[in-house]
Amino acid sequence: MNKCIVTVVGQDTVGIIARVCTYLADNKINILDITQTITSGFFNMMMVVDMDQKSKDFSDICDELSALGIEIGVDIRCQNAEIFKRMHRL
């Protein structure tokens, strides 16, 4: 399975989850796990997604998610799960 980590951070506003999840669904990316919190008006979401059936190159998806984040006023990052695990290993 080709797992990736998608993080979304920024000022809370209506529709963040809907816009990100719609993008993922439109590109055949399945959400395996999701968590989100809102602290003092700041939105934070982390998703583990499966990109086995993705319809575009990984780099294009990352670029488009970043652009979507700019459009909706949040920071969206996409990282390969293996790289993410190695970066955060103690």
Image (spheres, helix red, strand yellow):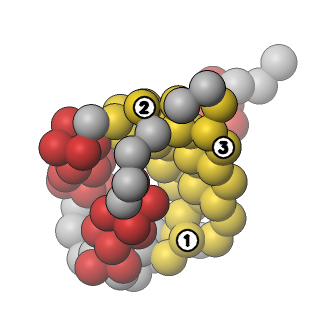
For the residue pair 78 and 81, the one nearer the viewer reads as: 78
Q: CA distance from mark 3 to mark 1?
A: 17 Å
Q: Kindly identify the residue that appears in the image at 24 percent across and 45 percent down.
A: 72
Q: Considering only order in the chain, which callout, 2 or 1, is on the residue closer to the N terminus? A: 2
Residue nearest the viewer, comparing 84 with 24: 24
- Residue at the location (54% across, 64% down)? 49
Question: Would you name the residue on which mark 3 appears?
Answer: 37
Q: Tell which of 53 and 21 is nearer to you.
A: 21
Q: Are marks 3 and 2 in contact (CB under 8 Å)?
A: no
Q: Which mark is residue 10?
A: 2
Name which quarter of the figure residue 29 lies in.
bottom left
Residue 47 lies, in percent from the top left, at: 58, 55
Answer few, some or many: residues within 10 Å of disc 1's Cα (few below 14, many 20 plus, some between 14 and 19): some
The span from disc 3 to disc 2 (Cα, nearest Å) is 11 Å
* Tag in front: 3 or 1: 3
Left/right of residue 88 with respect to residue 52 in the rendered view? right
Q: Residue at x 23, y 61 (%)?
A: 57
For marks 1 and 2, give the CA distance.
20 Å
Label located before the other in sequence (3 or 1):
1
Question: Which quarter of the rendered picture does the C terminus lie within?
Answer: top right
The percent position of residue 68, horizontal first and vertical second, equals: 21, 49
Amino acid type indicated by mark 3: Thr
The percent coordinates of residue 7 (x first, y second) are 50, 42
In this rendering, the count of numbered labels is 3
Q: Secondary structure at mark 3?
A: strand
Q: Amino acid at mark 1?
A: Ile
What residue is disc 1 on?
Answer: 31
Q: Is residue 63 left or right of residue 4?
A: left
Against 56, residue 20 (above or below) is above
Q: Circle 3: is it few (<14), some (14-19), or many (20+) Cα within 10 Å?
A: few
Task: Decide if residue 51 is in sight here.
Answer: yes
